[in-house]
Image (cartoon, grey):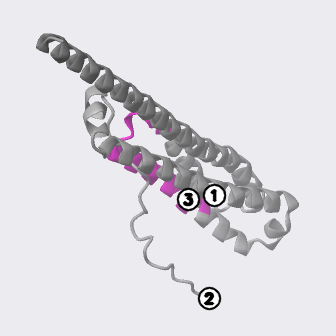
């Protein structure tokens, strides 16, 4: 066999191996990117569920606590702001995710104040409708926490895959980059103060 034939066969073999590796890596990148996108969609679904419950909760409290307008308005305003912020799963930058997380944090704080005022209204606490809404809201908050955890897990797996060698070479060639994850909110490392 001539040397030129051996060189040609070696070049073809290298091209086939690199092409196969690139194809496999690309397909894995797409698969993991879609997993992150699905997990983000699940997070948004749970936040939307909470946003849908808020008007019912506010209206129920309004009937009992008409003079608590400031607190009720804060909940409505926080909900409105949070539902106006959208984050594209293809462009999950730390800045956009932080903005989204801050808006959702405002909703959580406003809801906390709203639920706190119910202590002053024994009839409201006894209301079956209010109790059901409060239970649904609590369940939704748990679903949000779980969805965020699963999103962070999927994002971590994706980010590790994108950053590993030789995947990082192909990821750069195909335009895949790491994605942002949910971070703990400022001050969450300190226990809340409980006063009686």
Is residue 90 visible in the rendered image? The answer is yes
Query: Does residue 181 appear left or right of residue 147 in this picture?
Result: left
- Residue picked out by circle 3: 108
Q: CA distance from mark 1 to mark 3?
A: 9 Å
Highlighted magenta segment, given as a residue range: 84-111
x and y percentages locating residue 47 in the rendered image: 59, 47
Snapshot quadrant of residue 4: top left
Where's the N terminus, which quadrant?
top left
Figure quadrant of residue 7: top left
Question: Front-most of 58 and 26?
Answer: 26
Residue count near mark 1 (Cα–Cα under 10 Å), binned few <14, some 14–19, many ≥20? some
Is disc 1 in contact with disc 2, using a CB cutoff of under 8 Å? no
Say which residue label 1 marks.
Answer: 141
Is residue 88 covered in magenta? yes
Residue at 81% of width from left, 62% of height from top? 131
Q: Which mark is residue 196?
A: 2
The residue nearer to you, when weighing 132 against 1, is 1
Using the image, determine if residue 153 lies above or below residue 83. below
Indicate the secondary structure of the residue bearing disc 2.
Answer: loop
């Amino acid at each position: 066999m001539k040397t030129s034939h051996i060189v040609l066969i070696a070049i073809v073999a290298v091209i086939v191996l690199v092409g196969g590796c690139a194809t496999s890596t690309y397909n894995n990148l797409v698969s993991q990117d879609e997993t992150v996108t699905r997990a983000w969609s699940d997070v948004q679904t749970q936040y939307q569920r909470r946003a849908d419950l808020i008007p019912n909760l506010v209206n129920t409290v309004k009937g009992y606590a008409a003079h608590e307008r400031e607190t009720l308005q804060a909940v409505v305003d926080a909900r409105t702001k949070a539902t106006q912020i959208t984050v594209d799963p293809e462009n999950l930058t730390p800045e956009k995710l932080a903005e989204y997380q801050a808006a959702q944090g405002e909703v959580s704080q406003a809801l906390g104040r709203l639920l706190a005022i119910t202590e002053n209204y024994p009839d409201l606490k006894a209301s079956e409708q209010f109790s059901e809404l409060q239970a649904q809201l609590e369940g939704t908050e748990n679903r949000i926490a779980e969805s965020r955890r699963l999103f962070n897990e999927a994002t971590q797996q994706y980010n590790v895959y994108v950053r590993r060698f030789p995947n990082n070479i192909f990821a750069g060639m195909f335009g895949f980059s790491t994605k942002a994850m949910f971070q703990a909110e400022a001050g969450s490392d300190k226990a809340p103060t409980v006063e009686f």
